[in-house]
Amino acid sequence: MILLAVSASLAFNLVVQFGLGVRELTDKKAAPLPFLQAGVLFVSVWLLWAVFTYVLIPFLSIFFCYILFFPFCSIACIGLEKLADRLQQKIFPKMEAAKVFSPLSAYGGITLLSFILTIHIAGTFLEAFVVSLSFAGGMLFSILILNEIRKKASMEAVPAFLQGKPLMLISMGFLSLIFTTSAVLLFNALTGR
């Protein structure tokens, strides 16, 4: 279980490497931590894993299921975000939820990639739960790190050609390298290799 949590949260570097959701994270201002969207990511990946693993894949060909991944991820993100917005307005009417990603694009593809990896990694409900939770935590952790880099860059002398998006893209690349190295080291330590 620990191995799954470490692997899934550190595998979030794939999202950073492939640039999914980069547009939302490369603005000059700090991105708010989207706790509501992280919750929607967690629930949607976990529920979609259950639907595809136990309902659709046994009855449809795997190729046809792959075609359905993105539409189902997008619909899940839109529906669960609307439901979460309504619940949040009833419980905390004056509080505004931070939103960084668009649910129409399945959070810039983050939900899609998290779901595909969960389908391939998880075998049971508990494993899918841990992996989904780790992806949501990895998303929040990455945004937190990028916000700190953005804050530090505003206080330091950064060359003009690196300010803004170039600095964030380079930071995402380094973050990806760090996550990949950490994943390999922790995986080797946990498996005893």
Image (cartoon, rainbow, N blue to C red):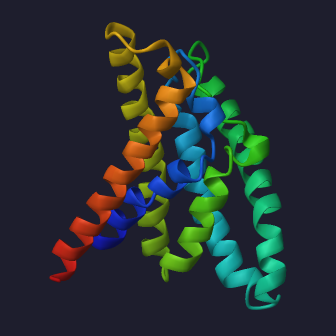
Task: From the top left corner, tell me how far across and down residue 31 is, in percent.
Answer: 52, 23
Q: Is residue 22 left or right of residue 6?
A: right
**Which residue is rendered at x = 31% and y = 63% of the image?**
183
Q: Is residue 33 visible?
A: no
Q: For the point 39% across and 10% down, which residue is it?
A: 154
Residue 101: image quadrant is top right
Comparing 192 with 98, the one in front is 192
At a point 41% along the width and 50% down the height, the residue shown is: 176
- Image location of residue 132, percent across then percent down: 49, 60
Q: Residue 45 at what x, y percent from top left? A: 60, 60
Residue 42 in the figure: left or right of residue 11 = right
Q: Nearer the viewer, residue 183 or 87?
A: 183
Position of the C terminus by quadrant: bottom left
Task: Find residue 152 and report its image quarter.
Answer: top left
Where, quadrant-wise, is the N terminus in this rendering?
bottom left
User: What is the tally of numbered marks visible in this picture?
Assistant: 0
Question: Which is more toward the observer, 11 or 177?
Answer: 177
Evaluate whether residue 98 shows in this view.
yes
- Above or below residue 184? Residue 53 is below
Which image quarter: residue 156?
A: top left
Q: Residue at x 29, y 60 (%)?
A: 181
Q: Is residue 2 above or below residue 27?
A: below
